[in-house]
Amino acid sequence: MDLDELKISKRDKLLEDDCEICVKSKQVKNQSHVPVPRAKRPLQRVYMDFWGPYAEGIGDERYYLSLIDDCTRHSWVFIKKNRLSSSVQNTLEIWLRQVEREAGKMLLVIRADNAKEFLALESWGLLRGIQLEFIEAYTPPQNGVAERFNRYILEITRALLFDSGISRKYWKYAVVTANYLRNRTTIVKGSDNKTPFELWHGHKPDLAHLRVWGCRVLYHHKSDDKLESRAMEGTFLMYGKSHKQYFVLPRGGSELKLVTNPEFRERENGYLSEPLANQVDVQSVPTSAILPIEAPQMPAETPAGAGPPVNEPIHTDEPMTDMTPETLNTPLNREDGEKERDSSSSTGGTMDKPVKPSRVQPEGEAEQRAPKRPDEVREVLRTDDNPLEAEEVPVDAGQESMPDRPPGRRSERVRQPSERMMESRQTELTYGRKRKAEGEDGSDDRPAQRMRAHLARLAVAAELLQTDREYEVAERVCAAPRLVARGNEQSDDDFDETFAPVFRLDSLRILVAIAAQLGLEAHMLDAMNAFAGSDLDKPNCMEIPEGLQDFDPEATSAKGSLVLELKKSLYGLRQSANLWHRKISDFLKKIGFKLITADPSVFMNGRGLIIAVYVDDIVIFGKDAKEIDVVKQRLKEFHPMTDSGLVKKLLGIRFTWGKDRSIQLDQESYARQILDEFGMADCKPASTPIGPSVKLEAPDSSLLGRAEHKLFRRLIGRLIFLVIATRPDIAFAVNQLSQYLAEPRKVHLAAAKHVLRYVKGTIYYRLTFSAKGRPKGLYAYADSAYANSAKNRSTTGFVFFINGTPITWTSRKQSVTAQSSTEAEYMAVSEAAKQAIWTRHFLYAIGKGSIYRDAPTTIYEDNQGAIKIADNPINHPKTKHIAVRYHAIRDHIGNGEIRLEHLPTDKMIADGLTKATNHVSQGRLVRDLGLA
C-alpha cells in the first residue's frame, strides 16, 4: 500500500483532538494579546521589577529596583546592593509613605514576577491592604510595562555613558539620570501629549536646568584664604531635588557634593574616564532617586516650558523580552589612556571586556565635544535662568537694541573640515600671502600670524563652524567656514572696550527720505569677515580647534597642546565688534569723512557723500555715481567687500526703487517668516491689531506654562523689530503686550496671535518716500491716552514726518503717573520735543538744515491745557509737581526751535499710537501714515 492509498476518515481526524499524546508532543505556550486593563487613577496598580546583577559599581551596587505607576507611567528607580526581601520591604515602606502623600491615593495592587524576594512580600501586603499580583513563571510579557521600562532606561544609560566617556563603574548615576530624563521628556500614549511627570504632579516639568551629563563643572569653593581659588572642578553626575541643585563629584574626591548653580562646561568631559584613587562612599548617594521612566514614544517637540508631567504607560504590540546584564555588553567609549578592566560576573555568565575605541588623542589635549541633542531640546536648555524684570519694552522706532540680521545664515559645528571648506580656507590664506607680496602689510610675520589665526583661532577655546551665507544681490552662496572664539571664556584682562555703535533706524529713514527728495543713490558694501581682520588691543592666545590640528604645518608645527598667539581679532571675541568699528572709522576719517555728532555710525565728507555703518554693512548715499564708485574702490582696497550696488535689502528691510525716484521700504519677507514660525501662515486676517474691548488686565486668566511663556516672549521680540523698522500701525498693540513679558497669561498670548492675524492681512504695507510727498518739511504729531496702561500709567505716542512720510514714531508707557489728562499730554509733547531736537541736529549735521527751513518744527497737539503750560511758564499749584525735565520744552519754544499748534482730536494721527482702535479708526491711521 502506498501513501496515496492511505485514507484518513473525517471521524479519525476528530479523534486527534482527544489524543493526549498529540497534546504532550505539540503543545505550545499561547500568549494572550488582550492588554491588561489600564489603571484609571494613580497608584491603582504599580509594576515592580529588579534589574541585574551587573558589574559592581562605586559602593558595590549591582541592581536597581524599578517601580512604574500604571496610570501615569511615572517611574522610580532605587539602586540596590542585593535582592534581599528585607531590603525591598524597607525601600517600599519609604517609597509608599512619599507617593501616597503626593498622589492623595492609597496603593492597591503591585504586579511583579515570582522572584523569591517578591513572594516574601505577600504577608507585608496583606497587613497594608495591598494586593500583590504575581505573573506566571518565565512569562515576562505579563509584566511588559516593567520590561519595556528596563529596556528604555538601559538605552538612555548606554547613551549617557558613551557620550561622556565615563567609566561603567558609575553606571548607577547614569541609570538615575536616565530615569529623571525619561519622566520629563517622554510622552505617554493616549495622554494628550503629556509626560509622566505632568500626569503625576499635575503640571509640566521645567527643562531649563538640564545639562550634559558627565560634563566638567566649576562650583563655588568657600575658603578663608583670600588668595585661594574660588572655584573647584568636578564632574556632573546627578540632579538634585531642586532644579538648580546638582550632585557633583569633585576632581580627585570620593564623595558627591550637592552644589547650587555651578558653571557648566558642557563641551568638555569630566574627570571620571580614568579610575579614581578613592572610591565614592555609597552613603553619599541618595538612597531613593525618584525619576520617572517611560518607554519609546518621544514627543515631536520637547516640552520646553511644560510643567512637571506624570508618567503614563505606553502600550505596544511588540513581544516583551527579559532584560539581562548582557544588554549592557556594548563597548563603552572611554578616554584615551584608560586601561581595560574586568567586569564582574552576571547571571548566565561573565560579561565581555569593553572594546576600547581606536581614537588617537594628542597628549595633554582635553577632549572637546558638542552636546548631541535634538535642536528642539537644545533651544529649551539654553534659556536664561535670570528672571525677567516686569518692565515694558518701549516700542520706539529709534531704539538701537535690535535683533541680529534676519535669517540667511546657517551654521553648525565642524569636526572634520570638508574639501569645500578647505578650498575656501586656502583662498583666505592665499589672499593673506598676496597682500604681503604687494607690500600691504607692514610686519613680515603678520601674514603668517594672520594665517594661523584663521586656522586655529584661539587659546581661549574656539570652534570651526560651517556657514552658508546668502548674498542675495550677488545671487550666489559662499561657502564660508568660520572659526568662532568662545568669548564667554575670556577674562577682563583680555580686552578693554566692547561696545560698538550702529546707526539708528530713524537715521536710516531720514537718509532715505533725503535720498528720495534730492534724487540720491544708496549703494551697499558688505565687509567680508569684518571681525577677523582688526589688530588686537591686548595679547590673546588660542587653542587649535578640533579638526584643524594637522591641516597646515605653518600653523601647527607640533602636536599636543600647541597654543597660538593671535595678531588679529576674530568672531566670538568680545572686543571684535569694537575693534572693527574703530578700524573702519579710522579709515573713513583718513579718506576725508567726518563723524557726525548726532549718530556715531554716520559719516560725511565735504562733497556731500554720506556713509552709514551697521556692523559690516556699509551704505553710501550720494548724487554722483562716479564719486560713490571712487569711495567704494577705496573701501575694497582697505578690506575685502561684496558690492551689492543699489541697496536692495538691508537688515531684513527690502528697498524698492521707483522710476519716479520714490523709495519704498517693507518687511514682507520678515513678516512671512514670523507667520510661518508661529504657525499662523494660513490664519484668518483681522482688521485691527488689538480690539478696543480687549482687557489685558485679566487676573482671572491662567498664567502661561514655561513653553508658552518662551513662545510669547519670542513672538513679542519679533513684532518689536517689525514695529521699529516699518510698521508704526501696530506700535500700540505691541507696546501694551510687551508690558506683560514677566508673567504673561493666556489672554496676552491670544492678543499677540491676534496681532499676527492683522499682520497677515496687511503684509504688503510699506513706507513710501517721495519728492512729491506733502506737506513738505519736518513736522510731528503728539498725543497721550490717560491712565490706560498697567499701574494706571498713561501712554505717550508721537510720530514725525518728512515730506509726508513717517521717519520716527513711538508708543510708550509714561514713566510716572500723571494726575490729569492735561499733565499726561504735557509729558507726551515734552518727549516729542526731545525727538524733534535730535532730528534737527541730525539734519543740520549732514548739511540738510533746509529740510526744516531754519524755522521752528511744528508739533501738533490736541490738548489746549498742555499747550498753554508749555507756552506760558507760569508757576501754578497744579503744575508745580511736574518734574523739571519735562519743562525743557519751554526753553526750546523760547529759542524758536519748536512750535506747538492745536489740532482737533479727530485729526490727530498720533491718537492711534496711544489707544486701541476700531476698524474705521485703524483704516484712517493707516491712510494718514501712508502705509497702504
Image (tube, rainbow, N blue to C red):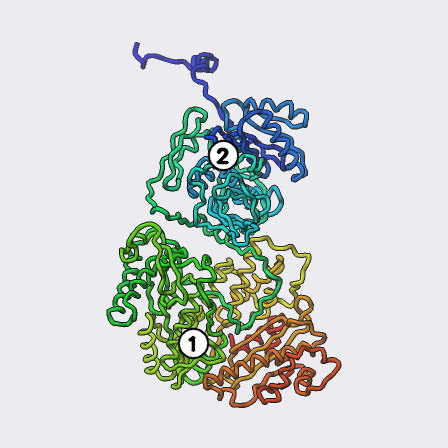
Mark 1 or 2 closer to N-term? 2
Residue farthest to the top, as pictured: 1
Residue at which label 2 appears = 58
Q: Amino acid at mark 1?
A: Ala
Residue at which label 1 appears = 612
| x then y, percent, for residue 187 | 53, 43
For this rendering, which residue is in front, 302 or 589?
Answer: 589
Q: Amino acid at mark 2?
A: Ile
| x then y, percent, for residue 9 | 41, 13
For this rendering, which residue is in front, 342 or 242?
Answer: 342
Q: Quick check: can you spot residue 303?
A: no
Q: CA distance from mark 1 to mark 2?
A: 64 Å
For this rendering, which residue is in front, 125 or 214?
Answer: 214
Mark drawn on residue 668: none
Does residue 839 sit above or below 668 in this rendering?
Answer: below
At label 2, counting other C-alpha atoms closer than 10 Å, the crowd grade (few under 14, some 14-19, many 20 or more) is many
Does residue 640 sit above or below 68 in this rendering?
Answer: below
Work out which quarter of the rendered image holds the N terminus and state it: top left
| x then y, percent, for residue 189 | 53, 41
Q: Which marked residue is nearer to the observer: mark 1 or mark 2?
A: 2
Considering the numbered disc 1 on the image, is that residue within a helix, a strand or a loop?
strand
Q: How many marks?
A: 2
Q: Tell me: 511 left or right of 866.
A: left
For this rendering, which residue is in front, 848 or 281?
Answer: 281
Residue 658 appears in which quarter of the rendering?
Answer: bottom left
Does residue 724 sit above or below 630 in this rendering?
Answer: above
At label 1, counting other C-alpha atoms closer than 10 Å, the crowd grade (few under 14, some 14-19, many 20 or more) is many
Residue 470 appears in which quarter of the rendering?
Answer: bottom left
Residue drawn 62% across the image and 57% down it: 746
